[in-house]
Amino acid sequence: MTLEDAFAATARAAVREALAEAIPTLVAQLTAAVRAQQTERWVRRAEAAKVLALSIDTVDRRIRDGALTSRRIGKSVRVLLPGVPR
């Protein structure tokens, strides 16, 4: 075995060990990030229109048609946007 082969084998072993330690943490962080982006959000009609690339009138129409879920909170109307990133 040459010096280069020994160095390559040592480097591969070190990388494997580092990855074995880092991968569970990275998977947990990625899972948490994905779950955070998949939570439901209640937003104002104007923000819903912006996020969905619709006019406010179309958002109102979809609320009336039942295509979007809404809730009145005080004097404002909030629209449920499931799975929209924060």
Image: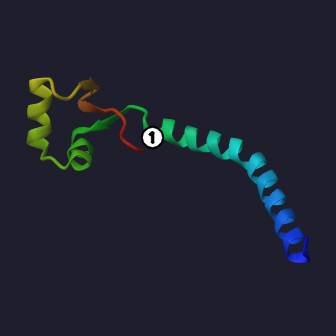
Dot 1 alpha-carbon crowd within 10 angstroms: few under 14, some 14 to 19, many 20 or more: some
Q: Where residue 73 appears, x then y in whole percent?
A: 30, 26
Q: Where residue 51 appears, x then y in whole percent?
A: 26, 47
| Camera-side residue of 16 and 3 | 3
Asked where in the image residue 13 lies, by quadrant, the reply is: bottom right
| Camera-side residue of 27 and 48 | 27
| Camera-side residue of 2 and 29 | 2
The residue positioned 23% from the left and 31% from the top of the image is 77
Q: Relative to residue 20, is residue 84 drawn left or right?
A: left
The residue positioned 78% from the left and 59% from the top of the image is 15
Asked where in the image residue 45 lies, by quadrant, the reply is: top left
Where 36 falls versus 53 (above or below)?
above
Where 10 falls versus 25 (above or below)?
below
Image quadrant containing the C terminus: top left
Q: Where residue 34 appears, x then y in whole percent?
A: 49, 40
Q: Relative to residue 55, is residue 70 drawn left or right?
A: right
Q: Where residue 68 appears, x then y in whole percent?
A: 20, 29
The residue positioned 26% from the left and 24% from the top of the image is 71
Q: Which residue is mark 1?
A: 37
| Camera-side residue of 76 and 3 | 3
Q: Relative to residue 65, is residue 44 drawn left or right?
A: right
Q: Relative to residue 63, is residue 17 drawn left or right?
A: right
The residue positioned 9% from the left and 25% from the top of the image is 65
User: Which residue occupies the extreme bottom position in the image?
Assistant: 3
Q: Amino acid at mark 1?
A: Gln
State the scheme by which the image is colored. rainbow
Image quadrant containing the N terminus: bottom right
Q: Secondary structure at mark 1?
A: helix
Give the tally of numbered discs.
1
